[in-house]
Amino acid sequence: MNDIKIQHNTASGSGFYENHLCYMAAQGFNLEDPVEYNALADDPHYRCDHCGRHANSRENLCRPEPL
């Protein structure tokens, strides 16, 4: 297993990562509510430099980079 430490985006202010798409997918939210999950990335402006996901808002990514 890779032990690389990632500095996560904490723009949400909560200190938790429950708003990040990678966390949501790991919890199965993308399968439980695909419409709401997909709405977070239907007009992407950012790409995660860590996991590669795209999102509308930087708050939904660990390491957001503008597209």
Image (tube, rainbow, N blue to C red):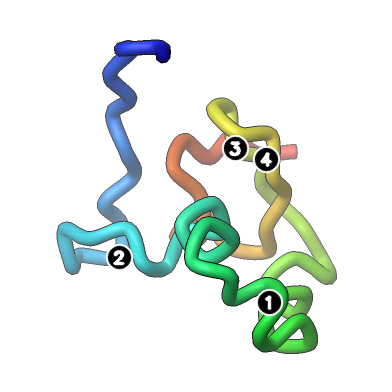
Residue 17: x and y in percent read 32, 58
Which secondary structure, mark 1? helix
At x 58%, y 70%, the residue is 28
- The residue at which mark 2 appears reads as 12
Which amino acid type corresponds to the residue marked 1 in the rendered image? Tyr
Which amino acid type corresponds to the residue marked 3 in the rendered image? Cys
- Tags 2 and 4 touching, CB below 8 Å: no
Give the CA distance from mark 1 to mark 3.
Answer: 16 Å
Mark 3 and mark 2 lie on one chain; the one further toward the N terminus is 2
- The residue at which mark 4 appears reads as 47
Mark 4 and mark 1 lie on one chain; the one further toward the N terminus is 1
Quick one: label 3, few (<14), some, or many (20+) residues within 10 Å?
many
Q: Quadrant of the N terminus?
A: top left
- The residue at which mark 3 appears reads as 48
Q: In the image, is residue 15 above or below residue 9? A: below
Mark 1 and mark 3 lie on one chain; the one further toward the N terminus is 1
At x 60%, y 34%, the residue is 51
- Tags 4 and 3 touching, CB below 8 Å: yes
- Tags 2 and 1 touching, CB below 8 Å: no
Return the residue found at the far front.
1
Quick one: label 2, few (<14), some, or many (20+) residues within 10 Å?
some
- The residue at which mark 1 appears reads as 37
Give the CA distance from mark 2 to mark 1.
Answer: 17 Å
Residue 26: x and y in percent read 52, 57
Q: In the image, is residue 59 above or below residue 62? A: below
Q: In the image, is residue 30 above or below residue 3? A: below
The disc placed on residue 64 is: none
Give the CA distance from mark 4 to mark 3.
Answer: 4 Å
Q: Nearer the viewer, mark 4 or mark 1?
A: 1
